[in-house]
Image (tube, coloured by chain):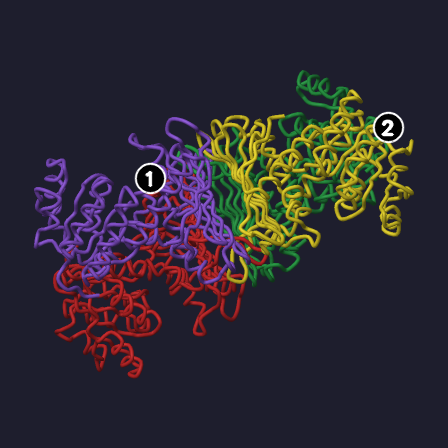
Chain colours: A red, B green, C yellow, D purple
Amino acid sequence: MSQAEPLRVGVVGLGAMGAEHVLALSEHVPGAQVVAVHDVDAHRAGEVAASVGARVAGSAEGLVADADVDAVVVASPDRTHAPLTLACLATGKPVLCEKPLGVSVAETAQVVAAEEAAGRRLVTVGFMRRFDPGYLELREAVLGGRVGEPVLVHCVHRNASPHPDATTEGVVGNSMVHELDILPWLTGLPVTGIEVRSPRSEGLREPQLAVVELGRVLATVEVSLSVRYGYDVRCEVVGTEGAVSLRPPARLDVARDGRAGVVVAADFRERFAEAYRAELAAWVAAAGRGGATGASAEDGHRATVVAAAGIESLSSGRRVAVPPG
Amino acid sequence: MSQAEPLRVGVVGLGAMGAEHVLALSEHVPGAQVVAVHDVDAHRAGEVAASVGARVAGSAEGLVADADVDAVVVASPDRTHAPLTLACLATGKPVLCEKPLGVSVAETAQVVAAEEAAGRRLVTVGFMRRFDPGYLELREAVLGGRVGEPVLVHCVHRNASPHPDATTEGVVGNSMVHELDILPWLTGLPVTGIEVRSPRSEGLREPQLAVVELGRVLATVEVSLSVRYGYDVRCEVVGTEGAVSLRPPARLDVARDGRAGVVVAADFRERFAEAYRAELAAWVAAAGRGGATGASAEDGHRATVVAAAGIESLSSGRRVAVPPG
Amino acid sequence: MSQAEPLRVGVVGLGAMGAEHVLALSEHVPGAQVVAVHDVDAHRAGEVAASVGARVAGSAEGLVADADVDAVVVASPDRTHAPLTLACLATGKPVLCEKPLGVSVAETAQVVAAEEAAGRRLVTVGFMRRFDPGYLELREAVLGGRVGEPVLVHCVHRNASPHPDATTEGVVGNSMVHELDILPWLTGLPVTGIEVRSPRSEGLREPQLAVVELGRVLATVEVSLSVRYGYDVRCEVVGTEGAVSLRPPARLDVARDGRAGVVVAADFRERFAEAYRAELAAWVAAAGRGGATGASAEDGHRATVVAAAGIESLSSGRRVAVPPG
Amino acid sequence: MSQAEPLRVGVVGLGAMGAEHVLALSEHVPGAQVVAVHDVDAHRAGEVAASVGARVAGSAEGLVADADVDAVVVASPDRTHAPLTLACLATGKPVLCEKPLGVSVAETAQVVAAEEAAGRRLVTVGFMRRFDPGYLELREAVLGGRVGEPVLVHCVHRNASPHPDATTEGVVGNSMVHELDILPWLTGLPVTGIEVRSPRSEGLREPQLAVVELGRVLATVEVSLSVRYGYDVRCEVVGTEGAVSLRPPARLDVARDGRAGVVVAADFRERFAEAYRAELAAWVAAAGRGGATGASAEDGHRATVVAAAGIESLSSGRRVAVPPG
């Protein structure tokens, strides 16, 4: 596989996620070069820039406008996602925007409209699970009819401990949103209704349990923030001919100290390291051709619509219908 | 373990379940002797009786009244459960009644009242899972705090194919009722609310998906009647310190024909063979002392109350509150 | 299952194994009554006797001769096994002798000859694995042709830490002897050769690794005494059509503290609790009819013959042929 | 990760393995371009060349000598491995030679000497398992002391059915050779002795069972060619503090047709697809810098020395000592 000129990438937001992306682009993804970075913390920006030989952009907007930046990764705080994605669209640059695509349905609708106006796909939303080898095999099995017609899906999404800034709405909008994106992708069916509840009625309301309707398919989604034992994501699809599920992704069995089994991933970065790299590689390849890959602006918008319905349900205690796209 | 005089048992109802009980009592359970059997099919009754040296009773009521019968197993059709159990109570005989204890809340309430009037426990309801070695270990782990305080429970209950007489209500009252009994037993908490739905809105409405509330604990229950691949019962409890679940009960791993793994049980009799035997053994021991074991009339009544709420929910499409006890 | 008069059992040797047998006979095995016990430690004998309402016999020989003892369990030190078994044969009493049947080939040959002279089977050797539900299923699968003709067997037999009295020869004669009994039982083929080695050339030579020949089948056996993590016994049979193996016998999966999997059994008593009970129950039933069950004197002799060949191999560093029976 | 000029690769031998390499280099490996191919079957060479835009070289020697070829992959029959590797060394070109490095100890010693004379590492031997993510994690665990000091290793290497050209010697030299390379790599210890046997004494002698000594560590190796159910490679390392093993690499659990578990890989190409790509990627990167990676000529020679000892053992029926390097 020979390469043409590398794609010159700018990265906005250098928190854990953004820094990881810079590292992955520099060390593991062919055909890319991180040429500019930005973060509100200028010191941090300087450090990261130095580590990969990039320059520090004075502002996010400046980075997007920079003529020497071919494509942009947006990993800054959620409220900046839609505005920066819109800025990229305005300059005609491919953008990989971390999920969620925006903090409101209005915002994400605006991104969809702007991309439509641009006349071609430029937006990729960072739903990295679509690039996880396990999820890809699962989808291939389901859509290939390996278990007949899908009837039920069970999703589990557990974190060891909550982020200090975690909010009840964020459990839906930042965590469950992964499942809200994956469910239609796995089944080929749009979400038509959602009901979310929690055993806790005050404070940080987690765990949350959702029942999601996708036409003739029903799904359960557990999102837990504080299971202590690690980061654990599971998915099973039950069909008319059988059932298929993700296996725990560990490569080793360890017997020690009276126990035998696997070591659980500590967090999402460890669990989805391969997915993030594959996502970046696919995005770099697509952006190099001026396009996009993975989850589209429409997919990102759709996930936000469903998440908003979920938040409404959690608050009202009732099922909320979701008009299909 | 030395034995006194064997308990003389009468068995009413010789369908698959009843015949299995007769066999187990004769071959695997110490201290019991099947002395009388009854079935509406007299020919079948004669065959079963002959196989174990019992006599055929002319009627269920006659069997219950027979002075040479110390204790009774009721395995006849559901609508006969409560009447026969009441008959046993009237004669002061220990009775093991297959679940459900009755076909209506009124019936099961009547049994509870009659036993209370009798002044001592005589009724055991056949929720055999309480005697399954796996469920027993799971309960011990949960109540012993192995995973902290329980927060969520996930139950799966799958059958290969529906019984020809299966009904939508029966999915709740005959199948899910096992989980409705096991959930409080596992957590020590009463059910306080239930919501049941199905992706199918007509015909035999299955699979069914329930969200069950037990105070601060939320549970999901999937009951499927037609997964084709076998009979599969699962249970996971998630707590504040970790999670614990039943492992598939197979004893062998088989690698053949391009696949490696376990053979799935064909049906509930195979899956719970050990539980049924342990249940009968415990019941014979308890009945020999004039008492009862396992699920009580109150437990059986409670499961019926929750099942009725579940059926109402399935029909109304809304959560139904269940007054605690 | 009704019972006749209980079998009056005497137990010689009240170490961990013997005390466990007394307990199991008293609490879990139908049709038996422990009426007499003996141990060189009279105080211990008194305690155990009191706990089950048995009397203390003044000597092992006295217990065997006692007219009120119908059958005998021999769980005293290895060097007493053959002499006490011979004493039982002399009085015509069924005897369950813990493995090994004797400490030399000469001894075990003498037992075989004595039983032959007695004209009927009275001896059962305590190879409890033959009653383990997993091994029974494995054997049924193998002999039933589930994986075609057997070609290879892999056995693993690990202990957490060595007994203080463990010896290099004892690793073969006391531990590996279980596999030396099970291999012919599983395959239906006699051992024809053995080679044993250890990575340690001095001190307590363990782990040991044996290659065992059973005609056209080859087997590997690992016996380790100090793996720290627990007691772990495995067995896989590879045949011309596939492979079948024992699954770890745990009933629960536990996720805690960054790990997910099973709790490993602490020792053989925990791992084979069910096997010991089933063995005792089968023995009581057989002894009640004046006979024996499980591994015969011939089986016990045969295992000793092969173990002796293994010890010779370990010492000489060469394969040792074993004349088939 | 930006790229310089792509490495121009020539591939000799376009059988299953070579064709796979051409495909992987063209589609999955960054920084490489297949510019020339050769096969004794000119028609096949033409097809493969056309599919990736390469030219067909008239002879293997011509391809090696071609000034427009920077580096060479040797995937032609075993007897050509050493001669072509020597040719590459003579021209100073990096070469990835499929295992085995040669068909005799004399040949592989010659390659080692030639590389030594060249003054720098140019040879990479295609022991792809060293690039398998599972084996890499296993090695890291073992060398990192996760299970204490290694004491035993158990390897299993099963094929569904033998290649039509399979020979008894080839079972050692072509199949078991993978384990003979991996064992020292995993433990950091050289092989010091080997004993190989088979339950079959004539015809194609397989399965084969080896006991391999690596100083204080003992290893068992099963190589089977005809297990029918699929391609299955396992490895467990037992240490002084516990045990660690490869998990089956499947990503999905499938429940269908009465069975639940994983789909077994069909062959080595499927099982080690990721390893082959990682190997090629690492080799292209190293060759681009004029060097080598993975298993060295010395490693390849060493594996051949041990395999020769194994073949001798199989024939003589005795353990064969291997002088450490």
> How far, Cα to Cα, is label 1 from label 2?
63 Å
**A214 relative position to C174: left or right:** left
Q: Is residue C89 or residue D243 the one in the foreground?
A: C89
User: What chain letter is assigned to the residue under label 1?
Assistant: D
Towards the viewer: A141 or A224: A141
Q: Callout 2: residue from which chain?
A: C
Identified by mark 2, the residue type is Thr
Question: SS at mark 1?
Answer: loop
What is the x, y in percent for residue C192? 56, 30
Q: Is residue D121 left or right of residue B281?
A: left
Q: Quadrant of the C terminus of chain D?
A: bottom left
Q: Amino acid at mark 1?
A: Asp
Which residue in the structure is indicated by mark 1?
A: D267
> In the depicted view, which residue is nearer to us: C127 or B75?
C127
Q: Which residue is mark 2?
A: C91
* Labels 1 and 2 positioned on one and the same chain: no
Question: At 16% from the left edge and 56% from the top edge, which residue is drawn?
Answer: D93
What x and y, as percent, mark residue C15? 78, 48
The answer to which of C42 and B312 lies nearer the viewer is C42
Q: Looking at the rendering, which quadrant does residue A1 occupy? A: bottom left
Point out residue C10 in the picture as x, y percentages from the top left corner: 85, 37
**Mark 2 Cα-neighbour bin, 10 Å: few <14, some 14–19, many ≥20:** few
B126 in relation to D145, above or below: above
Q: Nearer the viewer, mark 1 or mark 2?
A: 2
> Is A177 drawn above or below residue B294 in the view shown?
below
Residue at the limit of the structure toward the bottom, as seen here = A43
